[in-house]
Amino acid sequence: MIRDARYALRMLARAPGFTLIAVLTLALGIAANSTIFSWISSTLLNPIPGVSRTSDLVTVMRGERSDHPSPPFSYLDYRDLREHNRSFAELLAYHDDFMSLTGAGKPERVYGALMSSNYFDMLGVHAIRGRTFLSGEENPGAAVAVISYALWQAHFGRDPAIVGRTMQIDRHPYTIVGVAPPEFQGCKTGIRADIWIPLGMDRLVWGSNRPADRGTFWLNVLGRVRPGFTDAQAQAELKLLMQQIVEHTPDAHRGSPNQISFDPLWRTPFGANVYFYKTLPLLLGLALVLLLLACANVANLLLVRSVARRRELAIRLAVGAARVQLVRQLLVESLMLGLAGGAVAIVITFWTSRSLAGLVPPNVLPLTLNARVDHRVLLATAVVSILAALIFGTLPAIRSSSLPVQTVLKEEAGSVSMAFHKSRLSSGLVVAQVALSLVLLVCAGLFTRSLENAQHSDPGFDPEHVLVASYELSPAGYNRQTYVAFDREVIAKLSTLPGVQSVTLADFSPLSFTIHSDYLGIEGYVPQAHESMEISRAIVGPNYFQVMRTSLISGRDFSEGDGPGAQLVAIVNQAFVDRYWSGQKAVGKRVNDDGDSFTVVGVAQNAKYRLLTYPPEPVIYVPLYQVYRSTQDTVIHLRVFGDPQAVAFSAERAVHELNVDLPLFNVNPMKVTMQFGVVFQRISAVFAGSYGLLAMLLAAVGIYGVVAYTTRQRTREIGIRMALGAEKRDILRLVLGQGLRLALAGLAIGLALSFGLTRFLKSALYGVGASDALTFAAVALGLTLVTLAACYIPARRATQVEPTTALRCE
């Protein structure tokens, strides 16, 4: 094998052009796979960085599985489940949200989590400085905190005496007891937390007492099933326990489901994996198709090269070499090419693996989506490189080693060329390249059309000329009485700015994953068994619908009079009416939310607030001046006459004139922030489109190479044809016909494959069918034109052949 490897390297070095083209072709195909696998490794295979044995962790949820559930458990429910079950070794609970580091200077907004005291122990995460939490620190009064390595480094300058220091979180002092490892970022894939504090401190952080309220569902729960129990047994036990809890406390669980469902962490609905577990396997499948195309291209190069080596191989067989030795030698050469392509692919992957973060638009969440090239990616790349070598090297090696020795040693160049010209294997590989290219281009076209449809769909509001900016009042010392006055001052101040058309406030921004939900009781509607009454809830200020240009179908908008002390009112959207009051008049009906009864005064048209690709969902709107949530951010919505970015500075200055220490964050045009609503469609379209273009390029190069080589080898034949009276157009038609026949065969096979494979894309498409005729026709036509262009160059060159020169060259 060592001798074969040395010989292979010498042979490849003698053909630098062939080697360079083959290695780069393979590198593109392998890098496409290693890039996607680096994302899979960092998300699906490693959903919680820094935590080992994540495969036996499950997300515990209430009700049927959903891709967008809210935190499903109250603290008292979680505590009862944790203390009375036998099938789980541990159950942990957590709630994450933004916090503010206060004290000297302006508040600094960071993402953190409240968690049960067994959080770090169950995950197996140990502090690199100090300790994690003790069992008694879950109770109220334990003002301790564990901070992230990044916060320790950025905010405290990696102070070696950090343990025991005091920091202020939302104006309350906490003692730092530990620093988490650098790689640990929390329990949500793709979202980085910087502070962890005990659940009992909820009152100090967000001014509420949720741990004592069984009817407030705010905690996510993870569990590790005890050895000897199956997931089905654990799920059945928790379901029984939950039913008993609901029977004993029916009022606290009215409208909430008592079903229990599990999800493995790789597809948990909390975090980025809820999208990645669907998107990344599709992209990996497309990357594998691109790799097959690259292999077909290199296999054809090897077949072309084998023609020039026929005499060499025949001589080796004649002097006693066994056929298996030749096959082994040729496979070792292919392996050298595959490993070289894999090495170049790794270099490319170090760059492309970081491209995921560049596709994410500005948003309020602390997203960390950068993948890493770790040992899993290196191993996968090596395996793919070896498999690719076997794929593209086996058939050419077998074909090249099966030579009629005496015939080859006697044959002339013309017969060699005809041997290649009549090779069905080479033609078959060209057909395969065209077919695979068509499949990739069709997928790319479907994803691109889906993204375009989503971006041009009607969201139910007008984002043009709207600036959004957020602030948080609770860390700045505002309470229920003072926040209304400040919000009124903000609206009045911003309304006087030059270029401002209208202003409103809300607790969310559309399509930025910031809308909340509540469990509601609806007058006249009886929930079905296990039906969840968790419904999206938006807190909005006066003139919200006017600013957003969302039409009111009936009733009235909120006004300045809808404030503290006035009758509690609400507006619902048309989807709400269709779902719960179909065929009834909504205005005047009542909705109960957290013990408060709201009278519906208006019905708004449907709008999309989570994802553009989701159908409209029921939404209830309540007045900003009547509903106080200490945990809420306030989002300014500023409609202007010109460019929203032009008034950003003056808007920030106006808010700081009211409170110079109040941070304003996520200041962006709404057209920018709402792009988060199609971020995963954009990822699919960008990478599928890139793969499609690479596939078309490889197919064009492949068919050009084959047609050019065979045309060059047929020089004598073409010279004879021209000497006998053939016109240039006849030669052009001859060569183009050869390429066109291969292309049409590839198109036919590719269309059949595409019709079968695109069915698996249905769930990822929006506004376009998996067998969209326009996409299929456009791709087939485009690929045909590209193929003809690739064939035209050698065909044009063939028409320039002089008959006397062609006949004399033999």
Image (tube, rainbow, N blue to C red):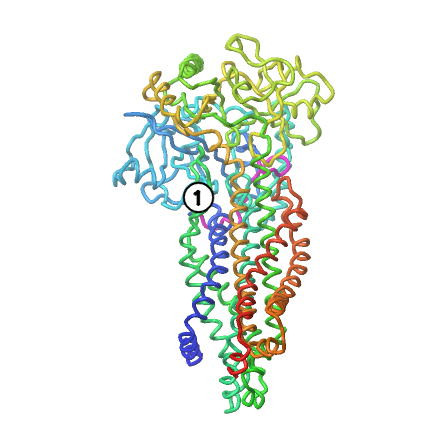
Q: Amino acid at mark 1?
A: Ala
The percent position of residue 458, horizontal first and vertical second, equals 59, 30
- In this rendered view, identify the residue nearer to me: 215 or 105: 105
Which residue occupies 49% across, 60% down? 30
* Residue 302 visible, this angle: yes
The percent position of residue 157, horizontal first and vertical second, equals 26, 38
- In this rendered view, identify the residue nearer to me: 227 or 574: 574
- Does 513 appear above or below 263? above
Quadrant in the picture for the N terminus = bottom left
Which residue occupies 49% across, 72% down? 334
The percent position of residue 119, horizontal first and vertical second, equals 45, 39
Q: Is residue 545 left or right of residue 661?
A: right
Task: Determine if the magenta segment contains residue 65.
Answer: yes
Which region shows up in magenta? 51-68
Task: Determine if the magenta segment contains residue 53.
Answer: yes
Crowd tier of the residue under label 1, counting other residues whose Cα lies within 10 Å: few below 14, some 14–19, many 20 or above: few
- Does 722 appear above or below 66? below
Q: Is residue 191 left or right of residue 297?
A: left
Circle 1: element type: helix
- Does 380 appear above or below 153? below
Q: Say which quarter of the image contains residue 604.
A: top right
- In this rendered view, identify the residue nearer to me: 462 or 788: 788
Residue lying at the far front of the rendered structure: 725
Q: Which residue is mark 1?
A: 357
The percent position of residue 540, horizontal first and vertical second, equals 52, 19
* Residue 208 visible, this angle: no
- In this rendered view, identify the residue nearer to me: 552 or 474: 552
